[in-house]
Amino acid sequence: MLGFNSYESNALTDTDSATLVQALRQASKNIMYTVANSGNYTVENPDEAGLDNMTLTFIGIDVAIAAVLAAVELIVVFRWRRKLGKAADGSGKK
C-alpha cells in the first residue's frame, strides 16, 4: 500500500472494508504528523538552511576516516607489489 513498487503484497483486495479505510486513514495521519513535526516547516528560508554543525562535523570525520583508510590501502598494495617484484627477480630475501 505504501511501497515504492507494485508488488502483489501491496495490492488492495477489499477496498470496501471499513477496517481497511480506517487503517489507511491512520497510516496517512501518521505520515503527515511525522512530516509536520519534523522541523522542516520551521525554516524561514529553505534555500539558505544548509546543514547544521553536528552534521558537518560527522561528514568531516567520515571523510577523514575514508582518506586514512585509502592511504593505508595504497601502502599495503604498494608493499605487496614490491614484494612480488622482488620475488620475480629472484633478488628478494626474507
Image (cartoon, rainbow, N blue to C red):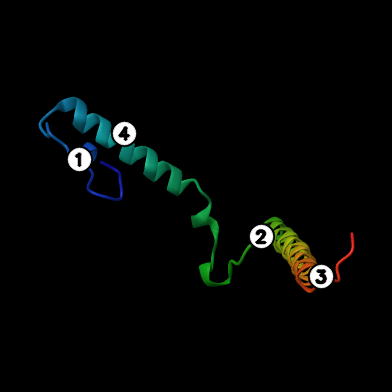
Say which residue appears at 53% left-offset and 72% top-offset.
47
Are the residues at dot 1 and dot 3 in contact (C-beta closer than 8 Å)?
A: no
Q: Which mark is residue 60?
A: none
Q: Position of residue 13 (x, y in %)?
A: 12, 34
Q: Earlier in the sequence, mark 2 or mark 3?
A: 2
The earlier-in-sequence mark between 1 and 4 is 1
The mark lying in front, picked from 1 and 4, is 1
Mark 1 or 3, nearer chain start: 1
The residue to which callout 4 is attached is: 26
Q: CA distance from mark 2 to mark 1?
A: 41 Å
Q: Is the residue marked by circle 2 packed among few (<14), some (14-19), or many (20+) residues within 10 Å?
A: few
Name the residue nearer the viewer: 89 or 32: 89
Residue at point 27%, 50% (across, down): 5
Q: Secondary structure at mark 3?
A: loop
Q: Which residue is mark 3?
A: 90
Quickly name the residue at label 2.
52
Residue drawn at x 41%, y 42% as measured from the top left: 33
Q: Viewer-nearest of labels 2 and 1?
A: 1
Which part of the image, by quadrant, shows the C terminus? Answer: bottom right
